[in-house]
């Protein structure tokens, strides 16, 4: 790689504040009701006299902050290892939708109003909707409110994002479609066109409208999705002297 490129990338990283947008994988974390829970079994431990420690992990493909691959809803859709690695690398757009009522949909009209105030969504953008659902996140019984009634993206807005040729769409809730949806228009519109979906994002309230986002999921053969570590790069705030 050209030395100038490496230098530029290093300077960009040094100048940026890094915000983690992913939940920690741990026992008791909320998952879709029909999905496998997270679990860990210790196989070696210092406490048992071993020289090292390791565990066997068990969890569903859609646990925690994760990326839905088209195969999640479409039998012939690409699986997670086939999703373009650049799908979650690029300009991030944070859309504030925390004003919505439970189960309500964020409409195309609302999205166009967002563009009027902040600027247009562009091809290749990673659009992340903040519904304020992170405030309800918890472990075990404390996740009761997180697991129901979340707002989501309306089908007309999802189609608009498809027409804009965004690279990915995400949410801070359990699913991009509103709670109670029976036809899952966002999943069908976006995944059907090969656009992956990010779910269970966190810390979106810490982001400005525009950021630079990097997210990578492991390459799992035939995966319908997989947990993803997502970070956002923003400008560091200058500290007063």
Image (tube, rainbow, N blue to C red):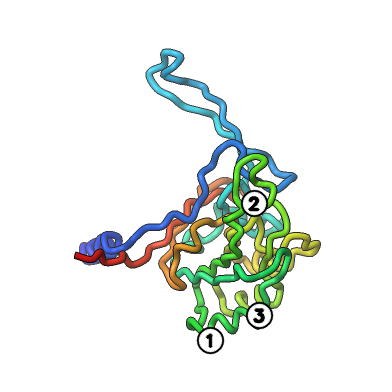
- Mark 3 surroundings: few (<14), some (14-19) or many (≥20) residues within 10 A: some
Mark seen at residue 224? 2
Mark seen at residue 108? 3
- Mark 1 surroundings: few (<14), some (14-19) or many (≥20) residues within 10 A: few
Q: Which quarter of the rendering shows the N terminus?
A: bottom left
Mark seen at residue 116? 1
Give how far apart the Cα atoms at labels 3 and 2 are: 28 Å
Please tell me whether mark 2 sits on a helix, a strand or a loop.
loop
| In the image, farthest residue toward the right | 182
Please tell me whether mark 1 sits on a helix, a strand or a loop.
helix
Give the side of residue 87 with respect to residue 176, left or right.
left
Label 3 or label 1, whichever comes before in sequence order:
3
Give the side of residue 71 with respect to residue 208, left or right.
right
Q: Which of 100 and 30 is in front in this view?
A: 100
The residue at 61%/42% (across/down) is 139
Marks 3 and 1 close (CB-CB < 8 Å): no
Quick check: 108 above or below 26? below
Give how far apart the Cα atoms at labels 2 and 1 are: 36 Å
- Residue 135 sits in which quadrant? bottom right
């Amino acid at each position: 790689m050209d030395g100038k490129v490496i230098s530029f990338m290093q300077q960009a990283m040094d100048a940026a504040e890094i915000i983690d947008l992913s939940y920690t994988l741990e026992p008791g974390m909320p998952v879709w009701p029909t999905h496998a829970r997270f679990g860990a079994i210790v196989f070696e431990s210092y406490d048992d006299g071993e020289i090292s420690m390791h565990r066997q992990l068990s969890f569903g493909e859609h646990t925690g902050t994760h990326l839905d691959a088209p195969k999640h809803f479409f039998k012939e859709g690409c699986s997670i290892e086939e999703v373009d690695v650049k799908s979650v690398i690029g300009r991030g757009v944070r859309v504030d939708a925390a004003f919505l009522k439970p189960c309500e949909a964020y409409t195309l009209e609302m999205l166009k109003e967002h563009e009027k105030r902040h600027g247009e969504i562009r091809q290749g953008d990673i659009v992340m909707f903040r519904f304020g659902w992170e405030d309800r996140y918890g472990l075990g019984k404390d996740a009761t409110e997180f697991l129901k009634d979340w707002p989501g993206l309306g089908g007309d807005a999802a189609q608009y994002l498809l027409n804009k040729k965004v690279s990915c769409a995400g949410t801070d809730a359990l699913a991009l479609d509103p709670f109670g949806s029976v036809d899952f228009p966002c999943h069908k519109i976006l995944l059907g066109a090969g656009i992956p979906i990010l779910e269970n994002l966190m810390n979106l309230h810490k982001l400005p409208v525009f950021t630079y986002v990097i997210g990578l999921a492991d390459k799992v053969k035939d995966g319908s999705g997989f947990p993803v570590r997502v970070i956002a790069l923003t400008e560091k705030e200058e500290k007063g002297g």
